[in-house]
Every structure is written in C-alpha cells, then in structure tokens.
C-alpha cells in the first residue's frame, strides 16, 4: 500500500514541571497510535479539544519528538530525517493570530514561497490564484495586521496551499472563519485533493459535519487513543441498526442522563443545555425503548417540547464510542 | 501547479542556505524599517544612536571638565560606537527566537519549512547589522565633526580595520546563535537574556573604560570576554596612537590579536552550530518550538 503517513505505537508523554514538586507530573497526550493514511487520501482526525489531535500533527510535522514509537511522512522518519520531511509538507493551524503584521498579505506569502524555493514569478502567479479562491484578492496589498482574524486565517490557509506540498496538515483550519468562508475553504480543500492523486491531506477538526462532508476516511480520537478508523459511511453504518432520537425537553429537574441509560433498550444518552431547555440525543436499541424514556421524563414532570427521529451521524458514532458528546468531552477536558 | 511540481521539489532542496539567508534578511529589514513612514524612520535612525552617545558624552564632560582632548575620550567614544554592533548583532540574532515564537507566532511555520534554521536566524540578524552599521556611522561622523574625535582617515589601517570588523561581526553573530539556541529552551523570561548578556559584556569588554580600571580580581573577566580583543583591534586600526596610550593589551601585537580573534570566531562558529543542534533536539523533545507564554 502506498502510504503518505504511517505511525506505529506512537506515543507522547509531556513532563510538566512544577517548581514546588521535585518529580515532574506526566501527561499522556498520545497512546500507541497506529495510523495509516494512503497517498491521495483526505483523512480526518476527529476528536474534542485535548484529544491529542494537535500533538499528533506536531509530531508528524517535525515540531515535536515522539516519546516512543515511529512516524513516517512521505516515506521518511519524522524524528530521524526531519530535513527530508519538511520540503514535502506544509501545515495550517486555525484559530490563532499569526503572520508578520508589518508585511502585506502578498509579502507574507511571497516570503514563504522563497523559503520553499519557488521562483518569484510562479509564486506571484499562485498567490494571485489562491487569494482569489479564498476571496482575499482585493486585500493582497493590505498589511496583515490590518486584517480581521478570519481574513488572516484565509491568508494562513493560502500559505499552506501555496507550496503545493505532498502532504498537507490542516489543524482546525476553519476555526474563526464565518460560515460562508468555511464552506469555500471546505470546497477548495476537497478539490485540491481531487485534482492530483499524489496529494494527501490530513485534517483535524472537532466539527462533525466538516469531517463527514470532506473526508475519505476518519479516525475518531479521544484521550490520546484512536477509537475507530473508517469511512464516515462505514462508521455510521455501525449504528444503522440503532434508532436515534433528538429530544428537546424542559430542564431535567435533577434527573441525570445516566438514569436514562439504565433503562432497558437505551444504549447511550448525551445531554446538552440549550436556551433554557435540555437537548437529549438518544441512541436506542429499538423504538420501544422510547416509551420507557418518555415515562421516566413525564414521571419527573419534565415536558417534551420536540422529538425527532433521524439518521445516525458521526456525532452519534462519537457518543457511542466515548459515552458522551463532543461538547461534554470538551467541557470535561476544560475542567 | 501539477506540471511544475517535480522541478520545485528539487529546487526546494537546492541552495537552501542562500535563499534562507536572503529571505530572512529581507524579512528582518522589513521588520526594522517598515514600522513607520520613511521620514520618521530616518529621524529615528539618526536620533537613536546620537542619544546613546550623548549620554556618554555628557557624563564624560561632567567628570573631566569637558576635556575632549584626552585620549580617554576617543577610547570611550569609539568603544561605545562599535558596541552598537554587539547590541544589534548579538541580540538581533537571538531575539529572533522570541520575536517569531512569542510575538509573530510564526516560528513553527519557519521550522517546518525547508530552511536551515541557524541560517534563518543569522539572516534576521543581518538586517540588524545593516541598521547597526548606519548607527555606528552616524555616531562616528558626529564625533569627528562636532566633538573633535581624532580620527584621520589617511592614518587608518584599513586592511586591519576591515578584517577585524568582519571577523568581529561574524563572531558576534555566532555568539547570537549560541544565545538564540539557548533561548529555544527557555520559555519564560527568555526576553531578558539578550539584553542581560549585552549589558554584562558592556561593563567587562573595555567598551567604555580600559580593563585596567577594573579591580585586579575582576580584570580576568575582561580578558576572557571575546569582545575585548575585537574592540582593541578596532581602536588600533582607527586610532592606533591613542590605543597605545592604554596598555591593556600592550603585550599583544596586531597579528597576535588578530589570531586570537580568528580563533575565537572559529570557536564560536563551531559552538554556535553544535549548541543549536543540541538545543533544537531538546526543544523538540520538550515541545518548546511553538510554546507561547506571553512572557
């Protein structure tokens, strides 16, 4: 198999030093990650904040050494041959304010083209094309410090594609972009991979829809471990025999979602407070189980405001694998 | 894009150091010069070095009753003027780590590009060198025309000056690389390091007073400071007769001093790349390449 990315038992442990304690505290960010990404694939890493996605990208882009295990990108060992990996990759991180603010958009991009050895004429031609793609052409001569966060992120995205890498890493690229710009970027990302079978793109995201829409295959990652890896369709197919309901109810009055999971036929329940109400996502083994849920809720004087039956999504796959929703996972890791 | 790809990938692996240096120097100059309009930049470029020199001149004037004919004045004035290079080049190279990691948050993107990071840091420092050269030139011109600095261009030992200056700048750049490499491993308070080192060397390198002025037990510090030898050579090349008035390095001939400076330059060149290699490895182990602390 022609692999663009290959990792074997890849692990990363951070040693956090506390001035008051002699022994550093260990934080396991990645545990024995085995991952194969084929050449020409648009591969998604899906997981909540703190799942280990960015750590994995940092290792694959040679910014961080693994604690153990091996990782190859474009056929080269990232720890032993970083200088061979670097001409073949590029990376874009989202949600950050980066760029040399004193330079214009065009100057920022031109300079990076120089670092990659792209002749000026070709670089300028590409810069123009790519700025038009992300609708930033009219701001080419604006200093990047004068751009909004979203526009600066567009510039950052252009910087990633400008060098036409063999393997491109996009770490939450649409973070900070408005809906329309996110759609444009997703469309471009897909077409960029489709245009050339030698191009591989690894995308990390915690937007389920983004992964579902874009990716050929998705790995669901949480707590530094890959929990599942397959095409979005196959992952959802695992839940095809289950019944999924979205139920909007009045506040839960102290009822714990775990109490609902204990009911017969209820496989998983995730809960999210929204606009003074509660939204329950129910994965049921069969339709009949809904009756138990309704009875329990009404017994606690909880009113059902809205009920929808729907097809399984990647969010449901995540809930099924992890036991709670992405939002709950992020709240837990923040806490 | 597809058709040109193989050519570009080869190009990316060729001439890495040259293009890294050029692009980094261009970026450094843009950052130095582009923060305001050209008129204000010009005024700033003139006023900044003169302000630094003025403080020293006023202090000297008060202490010596304005005795500008004393050889000590030329000794101090030239030492101070050329020390501008220390602050510019040494801290210029090392500060790039903080600048790119903390302020612009671009160090990680530079790092994953096919560049030689030490060459990139030196390129960024080159812009500071160019800016520093302007400051040194202005300081000396003002000294000659307004303060009777006894600098006679016909008496200058130009070959010695050019060789000493070049070797000294290379040595300072490599000292900056050592410092910048260490800064990769310091994520908090690293911003003070460059200034602290430059400040300490200011006292102990014979920039503003001969080393013999220091207490005997402190003088060895001056003799092991590499910049002491460089400043002595610069003074000997520019105002040889005045340099002879201060016997700090009287036991060394010009050739011996040049040999010491060449040795130190070579030492710091080797040290710069070795220390960078070690610190780069450690920084990747610890995850410090893109660590942002906001100081």
Image (spheres, coloured by chain):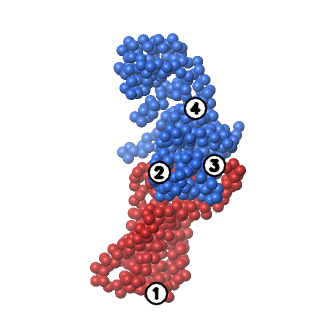
The residue beneath circle 3 is A164
Mark earlier in primary sequence (2, 3): 2
Quarter assignment of residue A200: top right
Which hue is chain B drawn in? red
| Distance of label 1 from label 2 (alpha carbons) | 53 Å
Q: Residues within 10 Å of mark 1 (few under 14, many from 20)?
A: few
Which residue occupies the foreground of this view, B219 or A293?
A293
Q: Nearer the viewer, mark 2 or mark 4?
A: 2
Discs 2 and 3 share one subunit: yes
Residue B43: x and y in percent read 41, 71
Mark 1 residue element: loop
Q: Please report, as a chain letter, where disc 3 is located.
A: A
Mark earlier in primary sequence (2, 4): 2
Q: Residues within 10 Å of mark 3 (few under 14, many from 20)?
A: many
* Chain the render paints blue: A
Say if B269 sits above or below B235 in the image.
Answer: above
Is B49 left, or right, of A201 in this rendering?
Answer: left
Q: How many marks?
A: 4
Residue B151: x and y in percent read 44, 85
Residue B87 visible (yes or no): no
Residue A331 visible (yes or no): yes
| Distance of label 1 from label 3 (alpha carbons) | 57 Å
The residue beneath circle 4 is A212
Mark earlier in primary sequence (4, 3): 3
Quarter assignment of residue A294: top left
Is A68 left, or right, of B238 in this rendering?
Answer: right
Say if A328 sits above or below A105 in the image.
Answer: above
């Amino acid at each position: 198999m022609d692999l663009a990315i290959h990792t074997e038992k890849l692990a990363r442990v951070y040693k956090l030093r506390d001035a008051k304690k002699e022994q550093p505290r260990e934080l396991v960010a990645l545990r024995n990650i085995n991952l194969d990404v084929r050449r020409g694939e648009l591969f998604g890493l899906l997981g909540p904040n703190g799942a280990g996605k960015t750590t994995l990208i940092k290792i694959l882009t040679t910014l961080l050494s693994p604690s153990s295990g091996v990782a190859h990108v474009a056929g080269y060992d990232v720890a032993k041959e970083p200088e061979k990996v670097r001409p073949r990759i590029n990376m874009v991180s989202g949600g950050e304010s980066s760029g040399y603010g004193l330079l214009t958009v065009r100057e920022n991009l031109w300079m990076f083209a120089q670092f990659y050895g792209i002749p000026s004429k070709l670089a300028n031609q590409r810069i123009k094309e790519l700025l038009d793609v992300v609708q930033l052409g009219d701001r080419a001569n604006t200093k990047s410090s004068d751009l909004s966060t979203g526009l600066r992120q567009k510039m950052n995205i252009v910087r990633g594609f400008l060098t036409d890498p063999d393997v491109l890493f996009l770490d939450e690229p649409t973070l900070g972009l408005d809906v329309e710009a996110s759609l444009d970027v997703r469309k471009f990302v897909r077409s960029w991979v489709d245009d050339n079978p030698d191009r591989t793109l690894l995308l990390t995201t915690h937007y389920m829809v983004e992964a579902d829409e874009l990716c050929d295959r998705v790995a669901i990652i949480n707590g530094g471990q890959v929990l599942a890896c397959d095409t979005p369709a196959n992952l959802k197919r695992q839940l095809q025999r289950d019944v999924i309901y979205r139920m909007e109810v009045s506040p839960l009055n102290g009822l714990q979602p775990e109490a609902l999971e204990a009911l017969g036929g209820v496989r998983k329940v995730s809960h999210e407070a929204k606009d003074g109400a509660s939204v329950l996502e129910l994965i049921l083994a069969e339709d009949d189980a809904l009756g138990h849920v309704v009875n329990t809720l009404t017994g606690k004087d909880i009113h059902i405001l809205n009920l929808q039956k729907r097809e399984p999504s990647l969010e449901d796959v995540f809930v099924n694998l992890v036991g709670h929703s992405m939002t709950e996972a992020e709240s837990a890791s923040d806490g | 894009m597809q058709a040109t790809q193989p050519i570009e990938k080869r190009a990316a692996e060729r001439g890495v150091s040259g293009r890294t240096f050029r692009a980094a120097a261009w970026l450094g100059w843009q950052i130095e010069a582009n923060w305001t309009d050209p008129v204000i930049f010009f005024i700033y470029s003139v006023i900044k070095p003169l302000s630094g020199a003025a403080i020293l001149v006023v202090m000297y004037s008060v202490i010596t009753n304005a005795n500008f004919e004393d050889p000590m004045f030329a000794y101090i004035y030239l030492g101070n003027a050329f020390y501008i290079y220390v602050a510019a080049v040494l801290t210029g190279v090392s500060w790039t780590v903080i600048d790119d990691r903390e302020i612009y948050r671009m160090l990680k993107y530079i790092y994953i590009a096919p560049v030689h990071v030490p060459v990139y840091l030196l390129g960024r420092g080159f812009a500071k060198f160019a800016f520093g050269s302007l400051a040194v030139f202005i300081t000396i011109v003002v000294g000659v025309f307004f303060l009777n600095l006894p600098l006679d261009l016909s008496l200058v030992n130009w070959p010695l000056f050019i060789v000493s200056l070049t070797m000294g700048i290379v040595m300072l750049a490599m000292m900056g690389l050592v410092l910048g490499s260490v800064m990769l491993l310091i994520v908090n308070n690293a911003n003070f390091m460059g200034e602290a080192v430059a400040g300490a060397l200011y006292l102990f390198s014979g920039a503003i007073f001969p080393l013999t002025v220091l207490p005997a037990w402190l003088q060895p510090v001056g003799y092991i400071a590499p910049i002491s030898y460089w400043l002595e050579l610069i003074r000997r090349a520019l105002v040889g007769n005045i340099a002879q008035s201060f016997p700090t390095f009287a036991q060394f001939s010009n050739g011996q001093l040049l040999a010491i400076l060449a040795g130190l330059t070579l030492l710091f060149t080797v040290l710069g790349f070795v220390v960078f290699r070690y610190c780069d490895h450690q920084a990747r182990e610890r995850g410090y390449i893109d660590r942002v602390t906001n100081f």
